[in-house]
Amino acid sequence: MHLRQFINETPRLDDDESQAQSPYYEIYMKEAKHRFHKQFPLTPVWGYNGRVPGPTIEATKDETTRVKWINNLPSKHLFPIDHTIHGSIDTPDVRSVVHLHGANVDWRSDGHPEAWYTRDYKMTGPKFKRKIYEYTNHQPGTTLWYHDHAMGVTRLNVYAGLAGFYLLRDALEERLNLPSGKYEIPLMLQDKSFNEDGSLFYPDKPPFPVPVSPSIVPAFFGNTIVVNGKVWPKLRVEPRKYRFRVLNASNRRDYVLGLSNDQVFTQIGTDGGFVTTPTRLTSIEIQPAERADIIIDFSALKDETITLTNSGTNTDEHTSVVLQFSVDLPLHGEDTSEIPQELYPPEMLDEHMAHTVRDLTLSASTDSYGRPMLMLNNHMWGDPTTEKPAFDSIEVWNLINLTGGPHPIHVHLVQFKVLYRRPFNVELYETEGTIEFTGPLEEPYDYEKGWKDTVKVENGKITKIIMHFKDHVGNYVWHCHFLEHEDHDMMRPI
């Protein structure tokens, strides 16, 4: 099954704009039929340009890319809509807006959840400002991705297929002599479930009684793993080094990835770009929205077959296998690619540089229908903004997780560094508001020692991150990237 879905469609120049020479794309959100497996019937999906995943956009650092994301979706959604959650009560069922995840971008092009719009812009959200998004690409080269971000239906729109890669390249990448061309492959990991007729299954109620129908669910785990739109695919490779840009685009599922032969692979990048020095790993954890840039060397595996495996949460015999590599292609020329000893010089962002330190809680509650609801800093989405960083300021956030499980927290606009985690007495904090540490500082995991825009905030611990708010001002958000949590008020304005 073909895993590469790069398209570099010829940019269409927009004669009506002063920036007519910058790359300009028109990408349509529309319903289409997609084959997830050769033995499956065609499945109705929503895709950018009708593709799952959407077209891969390749961009260059500091060269503006402009995209008009056109909503050509039908009037009826693929999945049942819960009309009791914020953003879905008095709005059209089918609405969309696109967020370029990890981008340093003006807020009017960030895909604010209330900047949604319907087909032909007949209705728009209160934060809708523009039809053509401008991505200045003013940041180091990295693996970004774009996805739907409409208030109250993000979980459904992304699950329907609205996600794609955005690869930002720079001069450093060109000099590093990494595996490239057909030896560089982005891998979008998702989990799906299917009905007997081949259509996508998404639950319309949680596994416990609620007085609402249809109702949002606390989490969704699919029973198959899909890579670049294919169920359990096989990739034929040559006996040489390959670069894989791995993205977790699942609603809720986390992955702990490894190789079935326990072979070491090399991580060269995180969410925000290259790490300082390569990291050799036998496994890597990747939460929803996180990316990992890795190199696998197949040179000693000629004529062998190995599997990319998953040992994350809620795995079974079906979800523990991701992708099979068959090293059965002949070597096409000598492999002259390299894994440099240094990738990106170290950049210092120390705690003493912070202008502001914030203590922000992740807590569990129930809504008016008795359903579990997660909140940030004990606030719902509609409450007044409490996080207001000053322009050109450095902030430290202590993310205090009082819930029973971890959450991947994403902050728009910035890339941050994870300073450390530390366990604390949750019960004492909840009763007295006092922080009592119960263990030593825990350094970031080897695979997250780089620039990040999404971090796993572990339960029973305080996760400390540091970031520099600069370049842009305006309306942004931070939220949990478990999409069911994000849609049910685990999101706050910045």
Image (cartoon, rainbow, N blue to C red):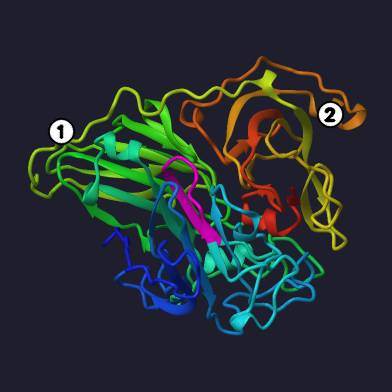
Q: Amino acid at mark 2?
A: Glu
How far, Cα to Cα, is label 1 from label 2?
Answer: 52 Å
Q: Amino acid at mark 1?
A: Ala
Name the N-terminal-most of marks 1 and 2.
1
Q: Give the residue number, with chain letter if any, for mark 1.
A: 300
Decide which of 2, 111 is in the foreground and name it.
111
Is residue 451 inside the magenta stretch? no
Residue that protrudes farthest toward the top in the picture = 440
Identify the residue at image location x=30%, y=45%. Answer: 307
Residue 279 circle label: none
Can residue 228 be seen here?
yes
Residue 243 percent coordinates (x, y): 29, 42
Report the number of numbered marks: 2
Which quadrant: the N terminus?
bottom left
Dot 2: few (<14), some (14–19), or many (≥20) neighbours within 10 Å?
some
Q: Give the residue number, with chain letter if any, for mark 2.
A: 427
Cβ atoms at labels 1 and 2 below 8 Å apart: no
Decide which of 367, 299 is in the foreground and name it.
299
Residue 471 percent coordinates (x, y): 61, 43
Identify the residue at image location x=61%, y=57%. Answer: 110
Residue 168 percent coordinates (x, y): 41, 49
Decide: is 77 above or below 116: below
Q: Which residues are magenta?
A: 134-147
Decide: is 202 above or below 174: below
Disc 2 secondary structure class: helix
**Image check: 272 left or right of 361?**
left
Identify the residue at image location x=39%, y=40%. Answer: 293
**Image check: 140 left or right of 383?**
left
Decide which of 481, 405 is in the foreground and name it.
481
**Image check: 193 left or right of 375?**
left
